[in-house]
Image (tube, helix red, strand yellow):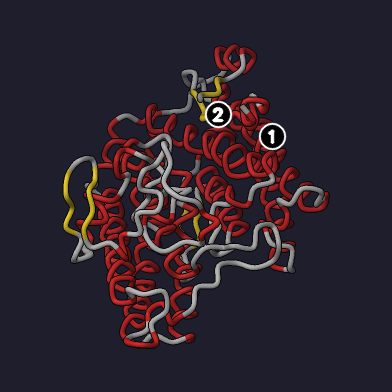
Amino acid sequence: MIRRLTAAATLGALAAVPAQAQDKTEVLGTYADIALAAYGDSLSTATRLQDAVSALIAQPSAETLEAAKAAWLAARVPYQQTEAFRFGNPIVDDWEGKVNAWPLDEGLIDYVDPSYGGQSDENRYAVLNVIATPSFTLSGQQVDAAQITPALLSDTLQEADSVEANVATGYHAIEFLLWGQDLNGTAPGAGNRPWTDYAAGEACTHGNCDRRGAYLAAASALLVSDLEWMTAQWQGDGAARTALLDNPDAGIIAMLTGMGSLSYGEQAGERMKLGVLLNDPEEEHDCFSDNTHNSHFYDGLGIRNVYLGRYVGVDGTVTSGPALSDLVAAADPQVDAALRGQLDATMARLTELKVAAEGGLSYDMMLARGNDRGEALIMNAVDALVTQTRGIERAVAALNLEQIGFEGSDSLDNPNAVFE
């Protein structure tokens, strides 16, 4: 779905004064520098995750499993801040599903609880369990999965049979392999995979521990290689940076499209309000690890990073420069001041949600029917995201840009459709 700018915003654009091209180029340079820094941090933390996974596989124990989980959580911090580069940059959009697709039918990958169900008309491979299945038929072709390799995951299993829920690669496949299913519903607790799922010999639980380790290793290697590729796209001669600077007007539109689409349809709608409407913990973004509150927080921070032209790296290094905020302030100081305030208000609401989750009210608990406090925490953040999207629309008008379509969501635009 696409949410269009209001007629008032479009008419307001006619009276606005466009920014100077040189200023736009400088702003786009900052934007590309932030992308390079954030994807670079995503790569470095994914590399540390891969090292922790290797240690788990080499010496399985409760300690090495917890270390791998901690590395996964750390890797999410910079990556979620890159999501503001989606929607407006085709290079990112075409690639993103490899690393952050969700939700997933985890039964494709490994064993699941019997309550999970079986194959369905929607997905014949929902419980394939490739870890326990060294040979299977996919779309009429026999597949040799005796060796679990990165190519098997990326070329054969990812979106197998053209089903988007067949997610075989990326952060969430790794998350499932580290935590296992969260079977707690809206009660406290995340997934509780035992470390012995990676143990050798008779200590192995749930079978196929060697193949489970091979899958985890392959998925981790793929994540690193995919992030290496994306980081290169933002280097000085990278395709993503070059595409922006070749057409500054289109580049500014890409920035605003990413901000508005993530703010409205993706985060406020699909990732937050939908779960409230359905009271369904399966709608959590990081559902196995109960890390959803952090994913929402860093998504919001990523939007603000783009507007303010400032990113703080995992080592404290600050990347900053001429910002989109500067362009909007030059065109209409009131619009800029209002949007800055709205971005701050969103981060305040997301901070409240994060503090509550870390204080014992986990995100899946917030989604429980009748949990008024939890619903209020989520919906306050949703409302703030919607309000800031209106501010982004006014920024588009102030810059005298062409009409932009932001991603929409039935949960926001047509809630009744969610239940059809």
Left or right: 234 with respect to 417?
Answer: left
Nearest-to-viewer mark from 2 and 1: 2
Looking at numbered disc 1 in the image, what kind of residue is underneath it? Thr
At horizontal 19% and vertical 65% (from top left) the residue drawn is: 146
The residue shown at (81%, 48%) is 370
- Asked whether, in this view, residue 50 is left or right of residue 334, the answer is left
Question: Based on the displayed image, in which of its 4 quarters is residue 16 positioned?
Answer: top right
The quarter of the displayed image where residue 79 is located: bottom left
Residue that label 1 marks:
387
Q: Secondary structure at mark 1?
A: helix
Separation of residues labelled 2 and 1 (CA atoms): 14 Å
Quadrant of the frame with the C terminus: top right
Query: What residue lies at 35% left-to-right and 59% top-to-bottom?
Result: 129
Image coordinates for residue 166, horizontal then vertical, percent: 37, 47
Label 2 element class: loop
Q: Is residue 86 above or below residue 107?
A: above
Within 10 Å of the Cα at label 2, are there few (<14), some (14-19), or many (20+) other Cα atoms?
many
Q: Which residue is mark 2?
A: 408
Q: Quadrant of residue 36?
A: bottom left
Observer-nearest of 179 and 113: 113
- Residue 379, compared with residue 175, is above or below; it is above
Q: Which label's residue is closer to the chain start, 2 or 1?
A: 1
x and y percentages locating residue 81 in the rendered image: 49, 53
The front one of 316 and 204 is 204
Residue density around tag 1, few if under 14, some if 14–19, many if 20 or more, within 10 Å: some
Q: Residue placed at 31% from the left, 38% from the top?
A: 162
CB under 8 Å between callouts 2 and 1?
Answer: no
- Residue 7 is left or right of residue 168, and the answer is right
